[in-house]
Image (spheres, coloured by chain):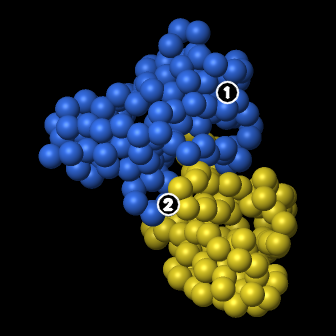
Chain colours: A yellow, B blue
Amino acid sequence: NAGVTQTPKFRILKIGQSMTLQCTQDMNHNYMYWYRQDPGMGLKLIYYSVGAGITDKGEVPNGYNVSRSTTEDFPLRLELAAPSQTSVYFCASSSPFSNGELFFGEGSRLTVL
Amino acid sequence: DAKTTQPPSMDCAEGRAANLPCNHSTISGNEYVYWYRQIHSQGPQYIIHGLKNNETNEMASLIITEDRKSSTLILPHATLRDTAVYYCIVRARDSWGKLQFGAGTQVVVTP
């Protein structure tokens, strides 16, 4: 199993541009999440999903959108990129039938200039 | 979910046990204590979790005080690869992945 795969690993955006961070998992997990991590800080939850077609806001959703059309994929859309969105983004997944462990991807480092 | 307090940093000699404290004095009865670590800039990795009993797995041991207001993660024989930021997180079982990460403890294992 590849686990949780994120693309791209690095990206530089100009202010006002848009882009989509891709996340896919092959563990058949129902739950998926997007976190962001600013330098020297802990992770903050952006959006999460408990299954295909169901998404909900986390702690810091402004400026982002998500969709969940399949169990495997949970893309994160940035509209009108701003410097404040410069961060490392982590996607994670978990199963409601396990011990609650989250499996994280390797992260996507985004810089907005 | 209850908040946690951890020391910002600690050093440990290679081969020695590393004891990482965590205070969670406002923990509720249905809340678990989870530990994750983040090596360099990789995604966090699950270590261990517990409710009220002490737990042990191949990576670490978790000691929870009887009043559940604090806990200690023990890495029995620290190696250089254990250098990481360690996060103590308290969450209710039904909150699943909505984890609240603090700043964690930066552990540096030295030769």
> Quadrant location of the N terminus of chain A?
bottom left
Q: Which mark is residue A35?
A: none
Disc 1 and disc 2 on one polypeptide chain: yes
Is label 1 in a helix, a strand or a loop?
strand
In this view, the residue in front, A16 or B41, is A16
Q: Which mark is residue B31?
A: 1
> What residue appears at the point 40 percent right and 60 percent down from the top-left corner?
B40
> What residue appears at the point 59 percent right and 51 percent down from the top-left corner?
A42
Observer able to see residue B58: no
Q: Relative to B81, is B91 above or below?
A: above
Which of the 4 quarters of the picture holds residue A103?
bottom right
Which of the 4 quarters of the picture holds residue B56?
top left
Apparent side of residue B74 relative to residue A2 in the rendered image (left or right)? left
Q: Where is residue B94? Give x, y as percent.
A: 74, 37
Chain letter behind tag 2: B
Q: Amino acid at mark 2?
A: Gly
In this view, the residue in front, A26 or A64, is A64
Q: CA distance from mark 1 to mark 2?
A: 24 Å
In this view, the residue in front, B16 or B49, is B16
Q: Where is residue B22? Give x, y as percent.
A: 51, 27
> Which tag, 1 or 2, sits closer to the chain's start?
1
Q: Where is residue B19? Give x, y as percent.
A: 35, 28
Q: Which mark is residue B43?
A: 2
Chain letter behind tag 1: B
> What residue appears at the point 54 percent right and 20 percent down from the top-left corner?
B70
Q: Amino acid at mark 1?
A: Glu
Outermost residue to the top: B66
